[in-house]
Amino acid sequence: MSTAHDELGDVRLATGERVDLGPVLARAGEGTVYGVVHRPELAAKVFHPTLRGLPDKLDKVAAMIASPPRGRVQPNGVVVLTWPSALLFDGDRPIGFVMPRVDTATSVEIHTMSNPTNRLDPAPTAPQWTRRVTWEHLVNTAANLCLAVQVVHRVDAVIGDFQERNILVSDTTEVTLVDCDSMQFTDHAGRRFLCAVGRPEFTAPELSGVDLRVDPREQPSDLFALAVHIHQLLMAGNHPFLRGTWTGGGRQPDALALARSGSWAGGPDSPLQTHPLAPPLSFLPGDIQRLFVRAFTDGATDPWARPSAGEWRDHLLRIRPVDCASGAHRIPSTTRMCPWCAIDDERASRNRQLRPRPASAAGPRRTPAPTPRDEGLHTRLVLLGLATVVAVVLILAAFIIWAVLSGASTFGTG
């Protein structure tokens, strides 16, 4: 059975090293990702030959290869960014690139970590280690995500499409950003390659109405999405602009409208209050609370007021998680209140109130069997009725006899 790469000829790197493409690892809109035979540390992305704007895409990848950010692969071998490392050629025609390979068998997308349901009830074929994740692991994940953003921002790059599916988390809470070739990047000559895609719930408010195919982003737009991801990790998967109790007039506005107004769940003077099944902002250390205010309240009108990835990382690493009073959860040492215990109690209370009453069985109406006391009463009533009937009969019989005798006497005297 032929595969897509069977149609390729002599695939090599620019150095002349031959590259034997292995099995398909992933298929995407722009190309196909393969393993590399005899080079397990590499993956190869081959662009579809019909891809619109392919020459510009290849120019962008070449520029990224020429300016790799420091720390994209850590000294211990941890891949922080799947940054392009070399162009891939079929003969003299560039067709894609190679990049560091990530072990996806032990990694999950970050939403699996953030969302308690996904984390505690993984699919049978998914990694099962997420069941053992505590809030402390989520804090570590947030800090490692900040490291990845720091690495990107060491060069003139913006993540742009900073959404959940482009962030992988390993079973050691280390974070890898994938699909790096979709990032916005500016080369040494000042040529800017834009990122025209993005998810609305991770899009900074200053980009509302902006044509991302024409207008570039700035790095603070990444810092908005970073704060959203951190909020979801620390706050039981709750998006700050999507889930809460709306106390304003009319219907709750969409996430982008709330972000533009700086109205977020539990924020200062926000009409969007914390949801009853979400932890309150007050359980977090004060410095973390203030970083969220800078990211979402101050940052709504001044994007440069948002905390940098380095600031977030420094403060996250200062959190000291401890066991809560029940011993069932991990919480910051700066608080005695365990929001997870309170949420468990609230959820249990709601479940009791919503539990349906057992439905009556279908079929003919039944009369309960009489108790022994009922049977004695019934017997007495029957005997009383019989006695009454006998008495009435005797009275009627006596009356009839009297009437007959009286009649006979009258007729005899006539």
Image (spheres, rainbow, N blue to C red):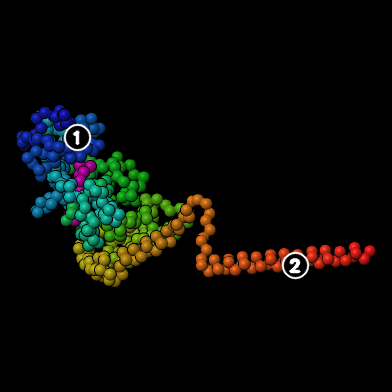
Work out whether residue 281 can be spotted: no
Q: Along the polypeptide, which appears first: circle 1 or circle 2?
A: 1
Secondary structure, mark 1, is strand
Residue located beneath label 1 in the image: 47
Residue located beneath label 2 in the image: 395
Q: Give the range drawn in magenta.
A: 173-182
Q: Residue at position x 25%, y 41% from top?
A: 194
Residue 220 left/right relative to 355 = left
Residue 171 left/right relative to 232 = left
- Cα–Cα span, label 1 and label 2: 115 Å
Residue placed most toward the observer, 216 or 48: 48
Q: Residue at position x 16%, y 45% from top?
A: 83
- Three-letter amino acid code at the position of disc 1: Phe
Quarter of the N terminus within the rendering:
top left
> Which residue ends up furthest to the front in the rendered image?
412
**Residue 166's x, y, as percent?**
23, 47
Residue placed most toward the observer, 229 or 134: 134
Callout 2 crowding tier (Cα within 10 Å): few <14, some 14–19, many ≥20 = few
Q: Does the magenta stretch include residue 73?
A: no
Callout 1 crowding tier (Cα within 10 Å): few <14, some 14–19, many ≥20 = many
In which quadrant of the rendered view does residue 37 lie? top left
**Residue 241's x, y, as percent?**
36, 54
In which quadrant of the rendered view does residue 323 lie? bottom left
Q: Residue at position x 19%, y 56% from top?
A: 173
